[in-house]
Amino acid sequence: MSANKYIVSKTPLRISFAGGGSDLPIFFENSNSYGKVVSTSIDKYVYVTVKSHGEVFKEKIRLNYSSTETVDSVELIKNEIIRCTLKHLNIKDRLYISSIADIPHGTGLGSSSAFTVGLLNCLHAYRGDKQLSQYELAEEAVKIELDLVGSPIGLQDQYGCAIGGFKSLKFIKSSPVVYTKFELSDMTNKAIFRDILLFWTGDSRSANDILKDQSDNTNNKIEEIMRMVDLASSLEESIKEDLNSEFLGEYLRKGWEIKKTLSKKISYSKIDKYYDIAIKNGAIGGKLLGAGGGGFLMLVVPQHSQKQVIKAMDCFKCIKVSGENSGSRIIVNI
């Protein structure tokens, strides 16, 4: 390997519309159903940098993410994703690894998996490996996060962030993940995102506790999760025909009502209160993104009602996002 490598990856975050919870292995590996999630990558990103670390620094490895670590061996790294990824790829070099993002972690947009995918993308480039496909990056990220780190998470985020665009993901027992990418017209894409508002609740959280509780409840919630899979399949058909914001809002509303029954940790009084306020002021439907418990509340709101909804939700910061089609990619390699 070159003694002076500098590589940067850019990996999108994602928002999911339907089927969340059915991507947990405990569901699709132990039921008679498959899982299905409909999601899209968005124009908010996680950037990962991998750089050869100079000989004059005292430490062998320096890491900058939400914390800073300086260590002399891979085994001493506290960040489980970085440690397991370096061990998995058998990289023992002097390295400087850093990460920055457009959105804070723990907000339900898949940032942990986006980081894993971006880190893998950088490290393969650092080793001079043949460029992996985005699907292969997602597969390897699943291995890191679920098998090596042991996180109690599902499989949607790795594929949702690695592969760009609007897509459905199908999870089948003992089989590779199947994805279908939708080629939406620019007009449809703009119309959908024109009516999507994300409200930052101010509460970030680790998804692991919520997902563990949800996993523990899965055997008692098979019927509910299958209804969410049906919603995802129905939404998929609507996308193929002619998706519009009114349909999307209704799907989100129905899915959110089901999802809240999967774990008591998914929603809480503050969210329920402001969700109802948003609906009364013109929102069609919405959901908390990710596992729940905080993060971003996504709402579908027609343009003529947006000012009213934003005013009514004034305790939350509102942001707009758009879809993106590029997925995870290397933007610097010198």
Image: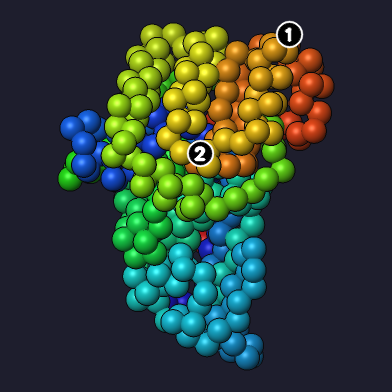
Query: Observer-nearest residue: 111 or 12?
Result: 111
Tell me, yes or no, whether the two marked residues, 2 and 1, touch with CB atoms within 8 Å. Answer: no
Q: Earlier in the sequence, mark 2 or mark 1?
A: 2
Q: What residue appears at the point 64 percent right and 88 percent down from the top-left corner?
A: 57
Q: Which residue is mark 1?
A: 304
Give above or below for 190 relative to 181.
Answer: above
Q: Amino acid at mark 1?
A: His
Q: Position of residue 195 (x, y in %)?
A: 63, 17
Q: Position of residue 186 (x, y in %)?
A: 54, 18
Give above or below for 334 relative to 245.
Answer: below
Q: What residue appears at the point 66 percent right and 20 percent down from the top-left corner?
A: 276
Q: What residue appears at the point 76 percent right and 34 percent down from the top-left corner?
A: 316
Q: What residue appears at the point 63 percent right and 28 percent down from the top-left corner?
A: 272
Q: From the viewer's perspective, is 157 left or right of 316?
A: left
Q: From the viewer's perspective, is 315 left or right of 190?
A: right
Q: Position of residue 102 (x, y in %)?
A: 66, 47
Front label number (2 vs 1):
2
Q: Amino acid at mark 2?
A: Lys
Name the disc covering residue 296, or none: none
Query: Observer-nearest residue: 35 or 243?
Result: 35
Q: Is residue 158 visible?
A: no
User: In the rendered image, which quarter contains the N terminus?
Assistant: bottom left
Q: Which residue is mark 2?
A: 264
